[in-house]
Amino acid sequence: MKEDVARVREWSIQELARLAGTTSRTLRHYQAEHLLEPSRVGDNGYRYYTEASLIRLQRILLLRELGLGLPAIRTVLADHPASVPALRTHLELLRSEQERLARQIASVQHTIEEEEGGGDLMAEKMFDGFDHTAYKDEVEQRWGREAYASGDRWWRGKSDAERAEWKAASDSLLADWRNAAESGVAPDSERAQALARRQYDWLTGIPGTPATPDGRPTREYYLGLAEMYPADERFAANYGGRPGAEFTRDAMREFATRNL
């Protein structure tokens, strides 16, 4: 009697790319970066993936959505190989983001309905889900209440267009930091030091930051922020995870040594 053998389900690279909404080229790149290996390669050279590969790819894509670069993702996957506990953490983050977006949707819907109906706007509903005070406690503890109050007045005094412009500039700076970290350049390289200069100039434009008599951020404040980035996962995520935040910190340290 022949022995029954359970057949392991597999997906070709084209099938996996279609399911994940990505491309075969991206999957091959993930393999080159040692993030996602195929379960096997057929005699014809085709790559095939099992359910374990699908779960790992889901984690990679979730981490990308959180803003982590490929080196940071590789570190996370190595440090937390068990998929279920890691996915539970991802799920909590996604639910938190879902709740925040739902609140934003409801607040915008409220504004539309009241504007169209001629009703009275409720200010507390208009800004539900839009929280620029997320780091209030950290700022006050490190640099005092007036530092936060000055920055808060500055932000509230901006028009919507000015806020959007400032956020776009900030996002561009963060993206350039992440790209530099992923490229493998050294923290003391010309590229990294140009970014550290941009970071310093960017901080100069924010009222309430501890400043020298000429209005420039103090060395202590600049280095304090540099240390905060990799120490707090919320900040680290902005720089592509801990490796990217550590790269940013080291570049800022070098800039401070040379210029401050």
Image: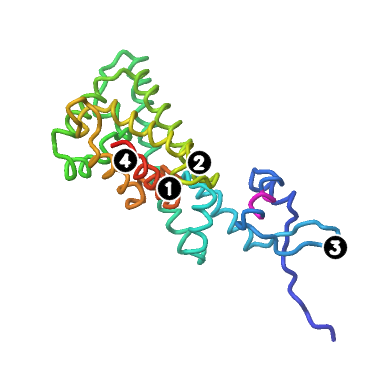
Residue receiving disc 4: 256
- The verdict on residue 28 being magenta is yes
Q: CA distance from mark 1 to mark 3?
A: 42 Å
Q: Is residue 58 left or right of residue 10?
A: left
Kind of residue at disc 1: Phe
Relative to the observer, which residue lies in front, 82 or 77? 77
Q: CA distance from mark 2 to mark 4?
A: 19 Å
> Which SS class for mark 3?
loop
Kind of residue at disc 4: Ala
Mark 1 near mark 2, Cβ–Cβ under 8 Å?
A: yes
Residue receiving disc 3: 43
Q: Nearer the viewer, mark 2 or mark 3?
A: 2
| Nearer-N-terminus badge (1/3) | 3
- The verdict on residue 84 being magenta is no
Q: Quadrant of residue 239?
A: top left
In the rendered image, which quarter contains the C terminus? top left
Residue receiving disc 2: 180
